[in-house]
Image: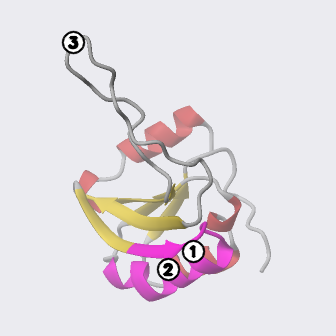
Amino acid sequence: MLRNEFIEKIKTIPKDKIVFIDEFGIEDNAYLNCGSSSIGRMCAMAKKAYQHTRMVGMVAGLSNGKVIAHFLFDGNCNKSIFESYVRAILIKELTHEQTVILDNISFHKTVMIKSLIESVEVYIIISSNSFSRFESN
């Protein structure tokens, strides 16, 4: 779906029926890389190693300005984690005739994801070029 087509499609959906879903992660070495100090004094900042030991991921929905169906996990999101999330958490929080909007990462476009979401009478839109072809599972 082209950008302009996507925008026009979104305009036709009531705002209270839209659910945006996305995932993100943070590494355990995140820290502030700036600070402040008194005039004439050096800013003392904690020195951190750049090597991380753990990645924490989260996937959640945003509907009517509220976070819904949130899920924390260790590591990066992948097809297996996302399918488990949709099956065990997301579809239980969706209501009839909502529209789920996903970005175009490959594991959002599987036949299984489409089937799970549509099984609860919810529409699905991928916010990028092509959603007409699903990968086979």
Overall secondary structure of the magenta section: helix
Q: Horizontal and vertical percent for residue 122?
A: 43, 73
Q: Horizontal and vertical percent for residue 53?
A: 59, 65
Residue at left offset 32%, top offset 79%: 93
Residue furthest right in the image: 136
Q: CA distance from mark 1 to mark 3?
A: 50 Å
Q: Circle 3 sits on which residue?
A: 39
User: Hey, what amino acid is under mark 1?
Assistant: Phe
Q: Is residue 15 above or below residue 73?
A: above
Residue furthest front in the image: 41
Depth order, front residue of 41/61: 41
Check disc 1: other Cα within 10 Å, few if <14, some if 14-19, many if 20+.
some
Q: Circle 2 sits on which residue?
A: 85
The label shown at residue 90 is: none
The label shown at residue 82 is: 1
Q: Are marks 2 and 3 in contact (CB under 8 Å)?
A: no
Q: Is residue 115 above or below residue 28?
A: below
